[in-house]
Amino acid sequence: MSQKSPPAALAPGHAFFFGLGYAAERLAARLLSAGWRVSGTVRDPEKQNALRERGIAAHLFGPGMPLENPERVLDGVTHLISSIPPVDAGDPALLAHGEAIRATETLRWTGYLSTPAVYGDRQGALVHESDPPNPGSARGRRRLAAELAWMDVLDGAGDVQVFRLSGIYGPGTRNAIAQVKAGTARIIDKPGQVFNRIHVDDIGTILLASMARPAANRIYNVADNEACPSGDVIRYACALLGVEPPEPIPFDSAALSPMARSFYSECKRLDTTRLVKELEVQLDYPTYRVGLSAIFAELGSGAE
Ligand SMILES: NC(=O)c1ccc[n+]([C@@H]2O[C@H](COP(=O)([O-])OP(=O)(O)OC[C@H]3O[C@@H](n4cnc5c(N)ncnc54)[C@H](OP(=O)(O)O)[C@@H]3O)[C@@H](O)[C@H]2O)c1
């Protein structure tokens, strides 16, 4: 696991996560060990208790369940990360607590975790952050609206940066090795379809690099250096495990959730020059092979 400390230029502050999910929890652990104060939201009281035991001040927040006393909860927060996906009505955190967020005077940096769905289908072309968004799905349109709402809410009162994350994977259950082992791995065959991925700990590294260099309303593509078909990743995981890959399923006849079908209906490669040039980030996991090999090695060492 990447245990890189936050950049030296980044003094410990108070990070608040709207949504302590997969990516947020991994970054929260790094911040805690670097002496930060960490708090945030969950929907489940059991998860709230588990996080509190690890030193994270977790608060309940979800549909019909606003934060209790949001001004007090946000008081002293220096860095705010939102990882809650938007709903039809808008961004859950902004709908419930936009005013309290805007009133948080201590806020120095805000990161909104978004998706490349805002670009729409680019038929495999390389997409740069300066390309105008053109979402082709309801999912992409909701995301774009949420990005704009976050940039708007703190207009002049804090630096919002938007991170368009490609397919997230990493230790635990969110990787192709775990899927193959669980018997849930499928190879969806759609000729020409490729996408990027990003290791969860590279996301943390990128967010930390951005915190050290705030840039108001800046957008960053967050991706590895190798867009490829999903089948390549499953086949690589099978090779690591020494098992035969599953038979490919043609896209047209595959049983897919509406979310997965919408995802596979678009194709793009993400340009990540900005990560390197502006944030000076070197990915620890530049390809899925490096990332999966590291996960496989950790499994072998019993670390997972
Ligand atoms: N997975 C991917 O490949 C991918 C790719 C691109 C972008 N993204 C986006 O990037 C962000 C981070 O991804 P992730 O995989 O770390 O997300 P995740 O594990 O699904 O975490 C999302 C967090 O948001 C909370 N949440 C969800 N809906 C909510 C609602 N209506 N009200 C309050 N809280 C809510 C969840 O609460 P609980 O903890 O209670 O579940 C969880 O803490 C998400 O917005 C995701 O959609 C994901």
Image (cartoon, rainbow, N blue to C red):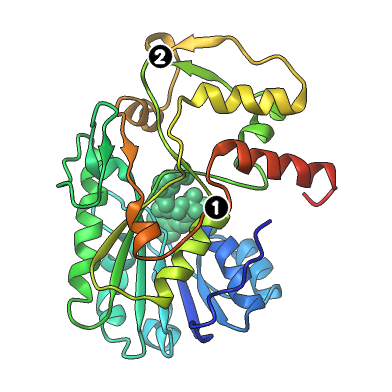
User: Residue 108, located in which quarter of the rendered image?
Assistant: bottom left
- Does residue 112 lie above or below 271 as drawn? below
Q: Quadrant of the N terminus?
A: bottom right
- Does residue 156 lie above or below 84 as drawn? below
Residue 67 seen from this side: no
Which of the two marks, 1 or 2, is nearer to us in this view? 1
Disc 2 on helix, strand or loop?
helix
User: Residue 181, located in which quarter of the rendered image?
Assistant: top right
Q: Amino acid at mark 1?
A: Val
The label number, if any, that marks residue 200 in the structure image = 1
Disc 1 on helix, strand or loop?
helix
Left or right? Give the position of 40 relative to 111.
Answer: right
- Does residue 273 lie above or below 297 as drawn? below
Q: Amino acid at mark 2?
A: Phe
Marks 1 and 2 sit apart, C-alpha to C-alpha, by 27 Å
The residue at which mark 2 appears reads as: 251
Q: How far from the left and from the top, in percent, is residue 191?
A: 38, 14
Residue 16 seen from this side: yes
Is the distance from the Cβ of mark 2 to the nearest ligand 1 atom less than 8 Å? no
Is the distance from the Cβ of mark 1 to the nearest ligand 1 atom less than 8 Å? yes
**Residues packed near mark 2 inside 10 Å, few (<14), some (14 to 19) or many (20 plus):** some
Q: How far from the left and from the top, in percent, is residue 161?
A: 31, 66
Residue sitting at 28 percent across and 37 percent down? 126
Q: How far from the left and from the top, in percent, is residue 134?
A: 16, 41
